[in-house]
Amino acid sequence: MTEREAGKRGLELLMRVRAKRPLIHSITNLVVMNSTANVVLALGGSPLMAHAREEMAEIASLADALVLNIGTLEPSWVDSMVLAGESANRKGIPIVLDPVGVGASRLRRESVERLLRLSPTVIRGNASEIMTVAGMTSRSRGVDSLEKTDEAREAARSLADSSGSIVAATGEVDFITDGTHSFEVHNGHPLFASLTGTGCGATVAVAVFAAVCQEDPLMATAAALGCYGLAGEMAAEKANGPGSFQVALYDALFNLNPQGALERLKIQAT
Amino acid sequence: MTEREAGKRGLELLMRVRAKRPLIHSITNLVVMNSTANVVLALGGSPLMAHAREEMAEIASLADALVLNIGTLEPSWVDSMVLAGESANRKGIPIVLDPVGVGASRLRRESVERLLRLSPTVIRGNASEIMTVAGMTSRSRGVDSLEKTDEAREAARSLADSSGSIVAATGEVDFITDGTHSFEVHNGHPLFASLTGTGCGATVAVAVFAAVCQEDPLMATAAALGCYGLAGEMAAEKANGPGSFQVALYDALFNLNPQGALERLKIQAT
Amino acid sequence: MTEREAGKRGLELLMRVRAKRPLIHSITNLVVMNSTANVVLALGGSPLMAHAREEMAEIASLADALVLNIGTLEPSWVDSMVLAGESANRKGIPIVLDPVGVGASRLRRESVERLLRLSPTVIRGNASEIMTVAGMTSRSRGVDSLEKTDEAREAARSLADSSGSIVAATGEVDFITDGTHSFEVHNGHPLFASLTGTGCGATVAVAVFAAVCQEDPLMATAAALGCYGLAGEMAAEKANGPGSFQVALYDALFNLNPQGALERLKIQAT
């Protein structure tokens, strides 16, 4: 698949999102509830945040995809995540897991272990998070001598193999793999790192695309990260700092269209 | 009452808000805590968010109005809502109920049933939410053959009759009724739908106005929705998408004044 | 110390923040989680929000400073604050306490009493909050006949004496004292009051600076409030209201640099 073909496919999926308006159920952290709801809306989806265990099964029955994000974790929320995930699996909708700060505590590692049993469709994290999760599920491959980037890729492939999930390690270049096939996404901008919740925003973008492309979650993940990163590039052109970047990011996601975007999407099969 | 008279009355209430700076206690959902606090502030009120049952009675004793919003619900929060509502009733301050997503789960429906027993002064929701709540409190009037808009209005009137509350069904046109008298508000903009929490923002705007106009909550609700919708129109003129719309919305609410607004307010007694 | 010397020292600390990127652990209120994370990032720090008691010790072991903010309080969160504070004290990192709305309820007063036992490095509040906390910890000095501003200063000094903390009473002029030495900061802008969470933003700014200047938390607090207030002044020059002010505030914090700022910082030893 050429970069142009991948870009075309990505933009077709964006148009499918706009037509289908998938409902994304998120159980997510308190910091990014508002910002990730706005990412879902700007892309054309419909956000629903709910975490009470009493309503997990009913909410899941309405949703087209489920986001599980472990930031600002509490044990009772993980119980709800498991309930929602089991309902999502029964219904057959994609689950996207964001292991925010998984290396920071035993609670987070153990929670991710529980959530991995749900067989998430996609796991999206930064290099360090992906390496931590990979280390929990597979024996070390002795990658200590590798470069950091290569190490993260090895970890992503290893995690994809052991979990059966698509794994996306995002950063300056995003790496997306099912263990066998992979994409690199070269869209993005350093200002993402100056704003809170932009990784969590990438995660919900993946859920939005995966909701309308269950036949190819690897492509959906690459397309989502390409569109999200490109919107960031467009936003950065209008921004003077993180405040104006955030505003312009929502606008750019909302206005993203095949005409303007195709030449600039850098989604590469590797 | 002519449209011009209604607009004048609405702007008098806005000026009263700015003079009195009413304190609005909200027990609301995690997604919109920040954005609705900013709506209260931009209009001239003072926001206070608190949900611990231990402090409900004291907080209520300070407040000029109470907002109960059931998004991201937990059962323990509903207990606090009931406590706060009982205190608000003892003190005689208005309660505004927002039945967010009430159709999504049994937990939400049962919670709204409990909250309706507090006799809220105003219930604000979209057409679908109002129809769901109306269906919980009154026998069907056989409105299946009506148009969607007419159906929502019938539901609003029916709910106002059965609950004794002012009911506001907001949408492209807002419909506000006490069961007998009604207003339509034709202010607003499609960009509201591309941003999270704008319905919840309308709800707190209603609370701000109701706090300073206990003698006429029907008028207060119509005035609040007119001012909020008009600020959205003004914001849309400067916006390129949902990000810049949100920024311009807070600015427009803050700068709203009788000089610029009177000609553009479309509050119609019906 | 002249105003120019104080400004120079403040900007040196800002540069130290940018070099060290201190990790700020906040247990804070639900309204400002996103906005204060963005303040930390814009200044050059790294925010981490976590409140589950199961991970408090581990998170504290990673952090360079701890913020405790009692807005939207729940008793279980205070338990976590105490655990995190004890870990912070064992590790020797600064604790910054924000007694949001402490006068509003017994729960808040009792929680602040518990948190004062952690010997916070800095207590930051508005005049009314500082006076309330001071009244909890020391006998009245009979300041009823003083002007409001003088009364707040007396309360700040008294609280600093009784608690051993640096106390910052912020407002039109910020007053920072260790009971003996004091600073006034004359930077700031009225638009701060039209936006939610700007006081909480000042608190995290203090934590960011205190994290890199443990040898002089009084200076760090004054520097933080000077930089934060000046960024607000710069933001106000580009703002049309609270929405655009917030955007420009993050941008200004991000872009703040010694060249532009030194002439405008008004940090005065008193």
Image (cartoon, coloured by chain):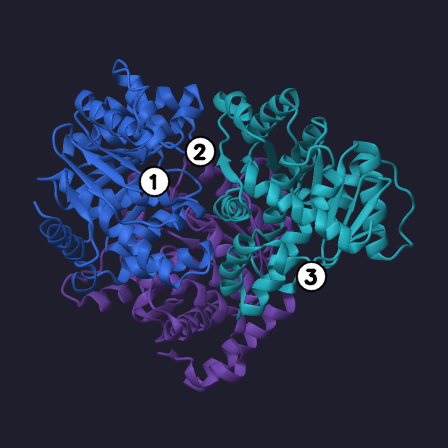
Chain colours: A blue, B purple, C cyan
Q: Mark 1 points at which residue?
A: A50
Q: What residue type is labelled 3?
A: Arg
Q: Quadrant of residue B57?
A: top right
Residue at numbered disc 2 = A72
Nearer to me, B68 or A135: A135
Task: Kindly report the distance in space between the C-alpha atoms of the residues bearing marks 1 and 3.
Answer: 46 Å
Q: How far apart are marks 1 and 2 (CA)?
A: 15 Å
Amino acid type for the residue under numbered disc 2 = Thr
**Which chain hosts label 1?**
A
Quadrant into which the C terminus of chain B falls = bottom left
The kind of residue on which mark 1 rests is Ala
Marked residue chain, label 2: A
- Disc 1 and disc 3 on one polypeptide chain: no
When the figure is inspected, residue C251 is found, relative to residue A108, above or below; the finding is: below
Label 2, label 3: how many angstroms apart (C-alpha)? 38 Å
Element marked by disc 3: loop
* Position of residue A66 measured from the top left corner of the image (x, y, whole percent): 25, 38
Residue B234 vertical position relative to residue C166 in the rendered view, above or below: below
Q: Which sits in the foreground, C111 or A35?
A: A35
Considering only vertical position in the picture, is C184 above or below C119? below
Tell me the element at label 1. Answer: loop
* Count of picture labels: 3
- Label 3: chain letter: C
